[in-house]
Image (tube, grey):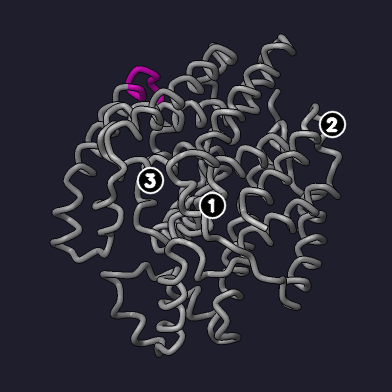
Amino acid sequence: MSLLILNAFLLTILVLLINNKKSRNNGFLFSVIFVVLLYLHSCIDPNTMEDLPRYCDSFRQWANMALEDILVTYRKTEYAFLILNWFVSLFTDNFGMFLLVESFIMMLCYYIWCFKYSPYIMLSLLLMLLLTFNQSIFVLRQHLAIAITLLSYPYILNRKMMPYLCICGLAFFMHHSSIVWLPVYFFYYLKSRKKTIVLLVGLTFLVSYSVGHVGMLNEDLDLGYDSYITGNKVGTSNLVEFFINIAIFAMYIFALKQKALDEGLYKLLTILLLLSVVGAFLGTSISTLTRLLLYYKVAVILAIPVTILHLKSNFVKVLYVSICLLIFAYVTFWGSTSIYYIRMSYLDPSDVFVLVSVFSYFLISYIYKKIKVYDYK
């Protein structure tokens, strides 16, 4: 069964479950959905998916490395991702098991984040499925780094710099592009609203300009990011991204009004959405920038639920969510990236997957019951 059919089936289930905040009582369903997503993300025939054969070859190469040899690969390979490969290889030479571990870590990060901060968990899971899930199947390193940065939210909001920097460091050594997440903490604690906006725009312009010249840096430092730079998705790709981002940002500001810059999650989401808008505008002809903006754009998974939480009209809520889901579904399933999934096929789940699924079910149920939910009052 193809990825599109499976995702469409899951989308149908999630849409039927999205009704109101009572969805927070559906702990059983969250656990089941986690297991389904874990299957969709890990039980893939790597020979039928873009980039996975290369990851598979690297897994086998690193499995044969001594630990001391890993230490001399700092210029081409992110340490954390390499060590994760090496650690899994101590137990198995099956690349499918690595995909299972990687998928479990990524999905767990998203679930913890949504459980804690989303007022409409089902909607956030659906948005995650549409915005990041499919690409994360073959863009392993960066999406794992993105998922790790989500764990830094409480440390930003509670002004705990050291845990925040540790998470940034782990994400950086998973994928170097996560360096763009580092300034977020400092943006959040700028006291002047005017200075915050000016600095955000200025720094985003600088980053956008720098990305336009990243080819020289890649060649000089032998970073191995050629595929990020030589892709042919330029021109209108980021322009469409810009219009989507600015529409979501405008609706967010319209719904929250002055609350958008109140201390707490609202202000953090405002900063991230603004970075996405400015970055997409300044980099409309730079396809590489879209990948960097993912660290900020993932905030949409929370921003849309927060937006409808503050909209008064039920009709406007339904209309807004419907339009967002239709646009994201079109981009995901019929956009330019859909060609990557044409040959994709799934393998039968292994015995290990069944055991991990049972463990995941009970773990998600436990986290759901114990996690401290963010107070929106």
> Which element is circle 3 on?
helix
The magenta-colored residue range is 191-197
Q: Secondary structure at mark 2?
A: helix
Quadrant housing residue 256: top right
Where 333 falls versus 283 (above or below)? Answer: below
Q: Residue at x 41, y 59 (%)?
A: 169
Q: Which residue is mark 1?
A: 147
Task: State the residue position of label 2.
Answer: 22
Between disc 1 and disc 3, the foreground one is 3
Could one spot residue 284 in this view of the protein?
yes
Q: In the image, what residue type sits under mark 3?
A: Arg
Q: Which image quarter is the N terminus in? A: bottom right
Residue 23: % across, % down: 81, 35
As drawn, the label of residue 291 is 3
Q: Mark 2: few, some, or many residues within 10 Å (few <14, many ≥20)?
A: few
The residue lying toward the viewer, choosing from 364 and 215, is: 215
The residue drawn where x is 81% and y is 67% is 358
Give the image location of residue 213, x and y in percent: 16, 46
Is residue 76 inside the magenta stretch? no
Mark closest to the chain's N terminus, 1 or 3: 1
Q: Is residue 333 left or right of residue 315?
A: left
The Cα–Cα distance between marks 1 and 2, rounded to whole angstroms, is 26 Å
User: What's the distance in space between the residues labelled 1 and 3, CA to CA?
Assistant: 14 Å
Mark 1–mark 2 contact, CB under 8 Å? no
Q: Nearer the viewer, mark 3 or mark 2?
A: 3
Quarter of the image with the C terminus is top right
Q: Is residue 70 above or below residue 66?
A: above
| Label 3 or label 2, whichever comes before in sequence order | 2
The residue at 28%/39% (across/down) is 234
